[in-house]
Structures are given as C-alpha cells and as structure tokens.
Amino acid sequence: MTDDMDLDPTIAELLAEAAANQPEMPQVAFDENAVEDVTNTFGVPGLSDSRNASVRMPNAKLPSEMGKEEDNPLAKVDFRVTSFTPIEKCYEDESNHIFDDKTYYKTALMGEGEAAQRVHKILSKYLVCQDPKDRTVYRQQIVTAFWELVKNIAPKAVSKSIPNPKRMLLRFGVVLPSLFTPEQKQLFSTVILENNTGEPVYYMDEWFRDIGSGRLTLSATDEARPKKAAGGANQQQLLSLKGKNDGKLQTAENMLTGKESERHALESELRGRIDALCNHFPLPNLDPHTSAYTEAQLKLFGDIQERLRALQRNNKEIVTYLRELEEAKTTANSLNAKMNEQSVTMEVSNADLEVEYNTVRQMAKMTIGRKGNQFPVFTREFYHCIPQLTGFRENVINTLHWIESIDPTAFHRIHKNTPNRIVPYVLLLPTYGDFGFCWEPFDRYNRVTSRGRIVVPMYPRDLKVSLLMAVADLRWQVAKEKASFYWMEEGLTGQYYQWIEEQKLKGDLKSFFIADYVLWMTKEANGTQVMDKKLRAIFWRFVPFAQEKKDDLKKRSMVYAELYQRDLNRAMSDGY
C-alpha cells in the first residue's frame, strides 16, 4: 500500500503538458437549471419520510442472505493469454437514456435516509451559493455526505435489481444529470456498461457487487477485521488453506501445460528428423536398391539423440508436476468436504463490507493526494478530460495494452524460473485525482498465481501517466517481495537502491522509482535521453523494452547500441 504523496516534479511537468493540450471546458459557478432540477425532483414528502426508511432496497439481498455465488471467472488467470486485446469498440452506438430519466435524482437518493437528505441539502446550497468562502465550506461538507451515501448504497450493489441511477452514482459519481454538458451527457450515455472484455477491470459498483457476493476477497488492510461468530476462526483458516492450495493447484496445472507443450514440440522435431532419416533415394541402374545415409542424414543421429535426452528430462518433470497436481486436487477435495460439513461459504458479512467500504474510501483519497480536489460529485466544473483519456474500462484496457507493448514484462511474476503473466485487478474510482497506485501486489495466501490490485482515478489530467504510476508501483512491490530480505542488494530494487545511495538522494525510494519509470516509458522509449547513464542501464536490464523497440533504439544512438551489445554479451555468457 502506498502513502499519500505530492506530485513528483517530473510527473507534474508531464501532467501540465497534458493539461495544456486539452480543450478548455466551461466553468460553472452557478447553474439555475441544476438547482431547479434538485428542488423539483426531490422536494417531495418522501424525503422526510426517508429518515426511518430501511437502507435496503425491496428486492435487494444482503450478503448474509445470499448463498454461495458462482466462481468469478475474472479471478482465474489464464496463462495462455500473452497480451491485451485492443478494444476497437469503446462506446455503444446508441444512448442508454439513463441520464434522460427525469426522476434520476429522486431515484438515486430515494430510500437512503439521512445520508440522502444531507447530500440533497448541501448540494442545493452549493449550487446556488456565489460566495467563494461559503462554496469552499459546502465543498468540504459534501465530501463526507457523499461517502456516507455511498456507504448506504454499497450493499445494494450486490443485487441485480439495483436501480440504474444508484448504480451510476457509484460508478461515475453522477448525482445530478443536469451537471453534465450536453456533450458529456451523450458521452456517458454511450459508455459500455457490462464487462465483455474478459479483463479484470472494475468500476466501483462492480467492485462492491463482487466483494459482497464473495467472488472477490476483501482488500488487504492494516486494520483489525470484525470478530467472527463462534466457529468463524476455523472457517477463516479453511478459507486461507483453500486459497493457498488453489495457488498450488493453478501453478501445477500451468507448469504441466507448459511441459506438455514442450513435449509436443520435441516430439514434432523428433518425428521430422526420423522421417528425414528414413528417406532414401533410389539408385539409377541398381534397382531395387536405395542410397546409403547422406552426410546430412548422418548429422541427424546427434540431433535425434539430443531430442531423446530432452524428452527424457521433460518426462521426469511431467511426472513430478502430475504428482503435485494430484496432491493439490486431493487436498482441494478434502478442504471442500470439510467446508461443506461446516457450511463454510464465501459470504461477506455487513461488517466486512463496511471494512471494504472504508478501504475504498481510503483508496479514493490516495488517488487525489493531500492537495487535490476531493469533490466527489461529477460536475462539468471539474471534469476536463477528453473522451479518450477518461478512465472508462475500454480506455484503460487500451492504455494497458500500450504499456505492455513497450514493457512486455510489466505483469510478469517469476516462479520456478518461469515467467507467468498475471494482470492485476484494476479498480476505477470516480475521482478528480492524478495518482494511480498498487494497493497490494498479490493475495497474501497465494503469492504465486493470485492477482494484485491497482487503483486508478477516472478523471485525471492524463490517464496514461496515472496508469504508468500504478504499474510502476506494482512492479516495484513485486520485485521487492521477490528479493525479500535482500531487496537492497539484488535485482531491480537492489540496483536502484544502490544508485539512489550513490546520488545521495533523500526521500521516498518508491516515489523516485515511479517518477523514473514514467520517464522511461514516455521519454526514453521514444529515444529522448533524459536519464542518468547508469540509471538507464539498470532500467534497460531490469525493465526491458520489447525487442522491436530495442532494435529501433539501437539505430538511433550509440548509447542504446552499447546497451544492446551488453544484452548480447550477457546472453552469450549465460549471465543474463
């Protein structure tokens, strides 16, 4: 997890460049139409009645009332996938008309008790207020009021029958559609609502939905979890054992699949060489006799023996992984039987959901930073993003694809000398922040195959920079965990730490790395040399560009040609 931080000067400069290139958006100090919508749509007797109203929607089920949900397909990592698929269709062809509903505001706040009342009261005052000091006070008050409203609505996100206005309030922070410009309203009305990408990218309402139904585990936190009822500790132990065993099971399957693919390739090569060896040409005037082995065929004997030895080694490894897979499956069956006996489900209590709500609110604060704009409600006054750089799911996936095209090992995690591509969960929060960050690099019960978690603001000045910061944070934490006690000596973190010490720089080490990673991906990747020579060499080795990018850069400058030659030398000496 990351602490709040001020903008690094390097990143601030990049964001300033991005802001300078964006079109001016209209500023709003007073909106008569918005005020009229608020008073007309919510100035009804039901508002005062809602004080004692139940927090639950009539058809909504709380997590404690739900049975075990189906497994979350996004939680399983498919190691056969090697890259993101670029999203070509980012918007629907037609509007969904959710924001055209005249009762949107009323539906969004209806049934939410005093929290809704407070939001309505403060928002009404804020929209009509023209005194700058008073507006500042109302802006601060609405932050707490809005998040209390989110706390009320979050449990209802589990239900499929949650009204769309409540869903959009969680997803985009849209409380009042009249705060859109017509162009913004059209844009948000054509956003693709369902996740058809197969990638683990979540909006806030989807996050609460899967947390509440048990398809996602609670995010890691330093706070003590709510005490469980009798037997809860044993159930928690079973769940943790299941998490660890799931990692072993998936690892064994992954390694076995890889070795089977290797065996198939070796057998194909062996079959081709044997076919070539058994091919004899007829001899003229000596029918029916054929020729002896040619020089090329004689060389195949050594190749065939080499393949046979490789197959023998491969078979030993397959036997080992088959045994590990069988043991993991036996353990899984045993754990499932015990869980069924004790009726252990993946349900999440209301207390646990409240802990996750507090975690998400802390995440939102961290995307903004100490000096950022904490205003939680979507309004054209603060939204200055162009459509392509707004944090919609499809834009985020396309940006991640761009990052991985330059840094192909960004999501790699090494296990048994095998790189596994594991894309983290991505939580998109409707904030006006600029900071993307990694909340946790992997699940504490399954460090091998579990997904990490990164958080990204939806309305930043530059979406690419925010995502680069999050990926850099993930990279740093994964590398540090891999090096363990030797993180100041070995690998990426060790080399970088020693360089920082040589420069006698004081400050947060990870923040320095994040800023340098952004430079690496935005400047050095294009051939603009802005980094120290030794630092560039560290990144070239431990945060390598794609091979095509390396081939291009070596032609641009002797600096990159020298680094390229070092790669070749290390490969020849097997010291890479």
Image (cartoon, rainbow, N blue to C red):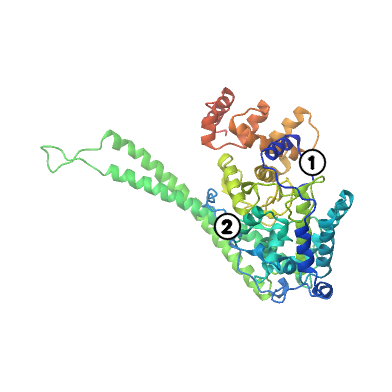
Residue lying at the far top in this picture: please name it: 558
At x 81%, y 75%, the residue is 45
Marks 2 and 1: in contact by CB < 8 Å? no
Q: Label 2 is placed on what type of residue?
A: Gln
Residue lying at the far left in this picture: please name it: 285
Q: Mark 2 points at which residue?
A: 250
Image quadrant holding the C terminus, namely: top right
Mark 2: few, some, or many residues within 10 Å (few <14, many ≥20)?
many
Residue 415 visible in the current orientation: no
Q: Out of 572 and 289, give the one closest to the viewer.
A: 572
Left or right: 25 with respect to 319? right
Tell me if residue 476 comes above or below residue 335 in the rendering.
Answer: above
Left or right: 196 with respect to 242? left
Task: Please state the horizontal and vertical placement of residue 339, each as a whole percent of the image.
Answer: 66, 71
Tell me if residue 96 comes above or below residue 396 in the rendering.
Answer: below
Q: Out of 488 and 141, give the one closest to the viewer.
A: 141
Residue lying at the far front in this picture: please name it: 32
Q: Name the residue under label 1.
A: 6
Which secondary structure, mark 2?
helix
Task: Please state the horizontal and vertical placement of residue 100, each as a whole percent of the image.
Answer: 66, 63
Q: Label 1 is placed on what type of residue?
A: Asp
Mark 1: few, some, or many residues within 10 Å (few <14, many ≥20)?
some
Residue 516 visible in the current orientation: yes
